[in-house]
Image (tube, helix red, strand yellow):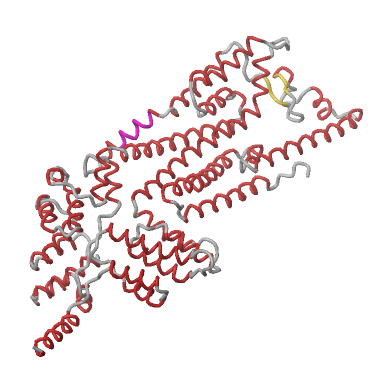
Amino acid sequence: MKNKWLFLFLFLCTAVCIFPETPNPWGDLKKIHFYHSTNNPDKVLESLERLNCDGIDRKEKDKIAAELTRFGDSYFSPGENKTADYQKAEAFYRKALAISPSQWFLYNKLQEVERKTGGGFIRIKSAFLQLGLLLQNFNASFLLVNTFFSMLFFAGLLVFFIFSIVLFVKYFKLAGNDLLIDEHGAFSTKKAALLLILLLWPVVALTGWMIYPFLIVGLLWVYLNENEKRTILYFLGLIIILTLVYSFNLTLEKNAQGKNFKMIQEVYNGRLFDRQDYEKFDNDLKVVQAFSYYEKNEYDTALDILISTGDGFKNKLKFDLIGNIEYKDGRYSESIANYSESLRYDDKNPVTLNNFTLALLKDNKQDVFDSYAKRYPEIEEYRKNVSALKEIKQASPLFLWKRLLNPQSSRVEFSLVVKNVLAEFIQLPIIYYILLFVLYIIGMKKLPVHMGGSNYCSKCSKIIKEASVHKSQKLCDECYQLFMIKDVIFLEAKILKEKELAKKSRQKYIIRLIFSLFIPGLNLNPKENNRLFINMATLFYFLLGLAVIGGLTFSKLFSTAPLILYLVGMLAFILYFITNLISILGDYDGF
């Protein structure tokens, strides 16, 4: 009897030594709970280091990562009368990131740890590492792309609106003088009514503010100088491009909300559909569905789905999955053939090379191994330390982006994408507002009043009529006598007038500087640097909108904003100061 128990004991010891311990992440997590509750920090870190999540599906990994994050939070903010342990908090956060890269927001927590331990501001490397993880999460990356395109479009429209207001302030007095004052210098009620109709009819007939920039520049077109006209035409071309980009964004939004794409997302996220459902899937989607079944250890169903795609359908993930399933079933020769097919698409893939080498060693045919080693010399290195089958990764998020362009088919038909974008473009009012702008330019010439007959005195900015302009000089009678007629009688009056004009110039300059606090680069317009103002202001408002609106949206949906958006906000304020600095360089205006 004693010999029997001794034999059993020796057998168990031998089994433990020969067979590696199966990873048990939930068991390790329970140990972490126990050692944490008994205040044994060394054992906590030891168990954390040992925790291995290989072989479990994505949802289980996310749950474990969430538990580790909660542990990290408990060390970062332990509560009253307890000291924070930032080192352990960082260890838990980094382990959670390693287990589930979808937890991209943990980089924000790591940034807080670094800040608490005396580190600097946002680390650029961490921000871009987080961005890389974020782009692997379709929902987060879609939100980022959607915000990017939306802010680009509305930033362009906002700057066009601001520029039209600048032109309105500059030239409305001239238009009002032509439209409101008749040939006898008296106020005309009929002309005033006409002006009100031209400006206010959109309030009654339409909604929104987007029409007014187009209406204003069309109304004032005859008063603009050549530089301003060229700037407007440049801006309209830019707006058409931004509208096309925004139309593409709307197309993506519409497809993302469609029934077909939502079903594709469910398949990608691991939902297992019944046979009658997945049999209707196209081949690409069948492979993704097979991966979900494979993840749940339902290998027979996964293999049936993969085989149903047919021999003519070639796909790397398909061959990797079949290779792993055949390997687990002991059919090494078949798994070798499938790994070999997979390597045709990516002969440097470390997971495929590892599994391929392992299958060759299990097959135990030296001539076959040597034959493949000539084609793939890397397997000689893998042979030295290969130990276990490595699990395959899910299809790249690019799969979802590809399907987002055309949810009905696995093929991206660019003609269909262009058709959908143009359909969205036509539904936007921008193209009709541009036509309205053209109609206003033409219509102003048909009015029974002479538009463009008024101008500003180049010295004192007094409104003058074309008939009173002295030859080639745009001067009123007073300025012509003071500045053009060389007579000592007007010397004292000329000096007083120059002081008065300098004072007005300083006042205008101060007003422009005040408005430049809110509209960077506004001071560029009087210098005829309109295009520079447009480009820099559009970029500023785009970056600011991306940082603020994007940050608020991410915080609402994910409880935190990516670090990259904080960097974008910093870049916006750097651009703000540079733009204003450029706008005031060399501009003294009497100071």
Q: Position of residue 10 (x, y in %)?
A: 14, 86
Q: Position of residue 261 (x, y in %)?
A: 27, 42
Q: Is residue 523 above or below residue 333?
A: above
Q: Position of residue 428 (x, y in %)?
A: 41, 29
The residue at the point 71 percent across, 19 percent down is 465
Q: Is residue 501 above or below residue 79?
A: above
Q: Position of residue 574 (x, y in %)?
A: 58, 52
Front residue of 102/13: it is 13
The residue at the point 49 percent across, 18 percent down is 205
Left or right: 67 as drawn, with respect to 304:
right
Front residue of 23/262: it is 23
The stretch drawn in magenta includes residue 420: yes
Q: Residue furthest bottom?
A: 3
Residue range of the region highlighted in magenta in the rendering: 417-426
Q: Quadrant of the C terminus?
A: top right
Q: Main secondary structure of the magenta part?
A: helix
Q: Residue furthest front?
A: 1
The residue at the point 9 percent across, 76 percent down is 364
Front residue of 263/24: it is 24
The residue at the point 25 percent across, 57 percent down is 394
The stretch drawn in magenta includes residue 391: no
Q: Quadrant of the N terminus?
A: bottom left
Front residue of 549/484: it is 549
